[in-house]
Image: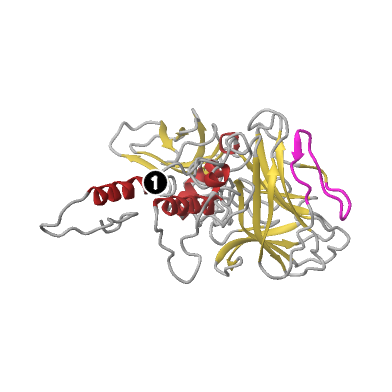
Amino acid sequence: MAGSTFSRIKTWIAGQTLTASDLNAEFDNVLSNLDPTGIDDESASNAAAQAVKDPYSGASLDKAVSLEEELQQLRYLIKQLHGETYWYVDPGTTDGLAKTALGITQGAKNLLINPQGEHAQRGASGSATFDATTNTLNSDNTYLDDRWLLLSDGNDVVDVTQQTGGGVSGKEPYIRYDVETAQKKFGRFQIIENKNCKCILGDVASVSVESNVTNATKLSDIRMAVFSWDSTADSVTSDLVATWEAEGTIITPATNWTAENVAANLSVTTSWVKYKVENISIDTASAANVGVFVYQNNVATNDTTGVFLEITNAQLEPGAVSTDFEYRGVGHELRLCQRYYCKSYDLGVVPGAIDDNGSINFYVDGVTNADHFVHFDVRFPVSMRANPTTAVFSNTSGDSGKVTMMNGDVVGGASFISDGGFKCVGENGAIATQRRLIFHYKADAEL
């Protein structure tokens, strides 16, 4: 039979006599090919259970000639997916097959959100700049691009900008840190929500990033570490650094934060390179949250302003091996960000700007001529992590705490705030036969 693992011994022709030896030979052929190498029992020993076969070991496809080889080729594929020693993984070990290759962790292996810095809703997202003059300042312990904190030894230590055309590929969006105050340490920190990091607590993880510097003498000591928070889940101290320490000495973390790996010098160069730290044991007792910190560790050497540290493609993943960077759709990434911060403005518009586009607008006419209140319910684009801190803005003045009504800019506010939305209220302050309420908002539920 074509395509089978074995074939008949003899092809019969019409009128031929069937003998006992012919019949026995055919049955022996079937029985012989039902042995372990032909069909089953491919786990008779450890060696048999671990056996794999590369289906493309040479210049052409190495086609299987038995079910044994078919099975071994499938095992080879599984092993390649997760990069472990064997195709199988003991659930009692710290290997990460189920967590990485099969995507059991929230449908994605990268636990970091906005890993390229592509979204920066607090600024003009896509070309955002954060410095000492912008609405969101480049101050220590401040969220700038979505989900990422700037930590620095003082304020206005670095300007932070979104850039394009970087990374190893030369095509990635990335974040640039431009030194504004010399001889100060600074870094980029993301805290992962408890629900999203349970897959690595008590297990192992690997972290990677693509980076370069414009001056490898001034910025000669770039480090990367994973930290665990061992107090109340999601009630974290966002300012990770208790003491920045002297040049060459790693930072001292704040109470309840513990470094899970020793942050060695990555020796970042003036060329884009992928750097990785693998097989990190996340074994701090009672750990509830995890954070990734990439930081500049020079002090005296960093004596020149205008030099850059550039970062993209950050990835924290379950397992002992750092794998290729995981790309997610830009819309999907934005919605992940909006769980922690969202706004009514267009993505490229800074909150607080004078702008009608995207404003929330309520209007009716022909009603009783009287002073009045207007209440309007707003729904967030996604359910947020927690009830957010919410601010409303006038579309005509950009002022916080104001809304536009028939009487112009008046005091407005947000009430009944939940993870799903809020109610905006404004009092007109003068009689009118129309009812109008126009405003923008921003909502912040960051860790």
Question: Is 97 on the left-hand or right-hand side of 296?
Answer: left
Question: Is 209 on the left-hand or right-hand side of 414?
Answer: right
Residue at x 39% of width, y 34% of height: 431
Q: Which residues are magenta?
A: 244-263
Location of residue 207 in the rendering, given as x and y in whole percent from the top left corner: 65, 50
Residue 95, by quadrant, is top right
Location of residue 275 in the rendering, given as x and y in whole percent from the top left corner: 68, 59
Nearer-the-camera pick, 97 or 359: 97
Residue at x 41% of width, y 45% of height: 35
Q: Residues within 10 Å of mark 1 (few under 14, many from 20)?
A: some
Where 269 sits versus 141, above or below? below
Nearer-the-camera pick, 250 or 23: 23
> Is residue 414 among what the camera can see?
yes
> Is residue 343 among what the camera can see?
no
Question: Is 372 on the left-hand or right-hand side of 269?
Answer: left
Where 304 sits versus 327, above or below? below
Location of residue 41 in the rendering, given as x and y in whole percent from the top left corner: 45, 41
Residue type beneath disc 1: Ile
Magenta-drawn stretch, dominant element (helix, strand or loop):
loop
Residue linked to disc 1: 39
Q: Is residue 250 magenta?
A: yes
Q: Is residue 30 magenta?
A: no
Question: Is 190 on the left-hand or right-hand side of 442?
Answer: right
Secondary structure under the numbered disc 1 in the rendered image: loop
Residue at x 57% of width, y 68% of height: 169
Residue 156, by quadrant, is bottom right
Nearer-the-camera pick, 54 or 394: 54
Residue at x 51% of width, y 33% of height: 414
